[in-house]
Image: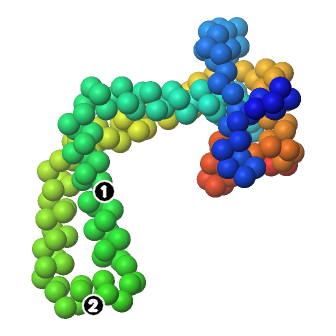
Amino acid sequence: MSATNENMQIMSGVEVPPFRNFHEFLLETNRYERPPFNDFKRWNNRIISNLLYFQTNYFITIIVLFLLHTFISSQDIFIGLIAVVAVIATLIFAVSADANIKKMRTDHPLVTLGGIILIAYFFISVFSSVLVVLFALLFPIFLVLVHASLRLRGLANRAANAKEQLGIRTSVMGQILDRTGLNVKM
């Protein structure tokens, strides 16, 4: 990293901004304000700006909270992840257009139906563990969105976001927001 570019490159043209210090990220209490609920455009701009500016802090927060939750409820997380992966694999198997899989489904319909029923039964029987996994994933994201809603933008925040909007740099969060339909480019 050079002195002029504080961002770390991870892929061609995609950068990760530096970790913002704890004081700037969380402790500046004069930088918090109730979101402008009556002005969705301003509120949306505030959230996107904060997501782009504090993205490294947000990613680390999500990972740490997920790992902490995994440490506390490791058995439920493990079982819930197995159930979710099993359901996803079953759905992929059930709707696959691959000729070999289609042939197997038509040649052995009772085995296919029995497998689907067993996976559904397993999923329903460990549904509480699936909810633990969902909570472990969604609660940190909720906290990030609350912080991004409450935190006012500063001058450094606006300058960093202007680079993203003009296309001078592309960040991981910018890529995620673009792929979810929230265009950060002008």
Residue at left 20%, top 36%? 75
In the rendered structure, the answer to whether residue 170 lies left or right of residue 61 reads right
Q: Earlier in the sequence, mark 2 or mark 1?
A: 1
Query: How crowded is the residue under tag 2: few (<14 C-alpha within 10 Å), some, or many (20+)?
Result: few
Provide residue 123's location: percent of width, then percent of height.
Answer: 20, 55
In the rendered structure, the answer to whether residue 74 lies left or right of residue 145 reads left
Are circles 2 and 1 on residues that touch, CB within 8 Å? no
Instruction: Give residue 87's quadrant in the image.
Output: bottom left
Instruction: Give residue 106's quadrant in the image.
Output: bottom left
Above-or-below relation of 117 to 26: below
Residue at left 13%, top 79%? 111
- Is residue 87 something that shows in the picture? yes
Frontmost residue, 70 versus 51 = 70
* Quadrant containing the N terminus in the rendered view: top right
Residue at left 66%, top 44%? 10
Question: Label 2 sits on what residue type?
Answer: Lys
- Of helix, strand and loop, which one carries label 1? helix
> Residue 103: which disc?
2
Question: Label 1 sits on what residue type?
Answer: Val
Q: Which residue is mark 1?
A: 85
Above-or-below relation of 7 to 32: below
Provide residue 41's location: percent of width, then percent of height.
Answer: 75, 39
Frontmost residue, 35 versus 165 = 165
Q: CA distance from mark 2 to mark 1?
A: 23 Å
Provide residue 122's location: percent of width, then percent of height.
Answer: 15, 56
> Residue 130: which disc?
none
- Is residue 182 something that shows in the picture? no
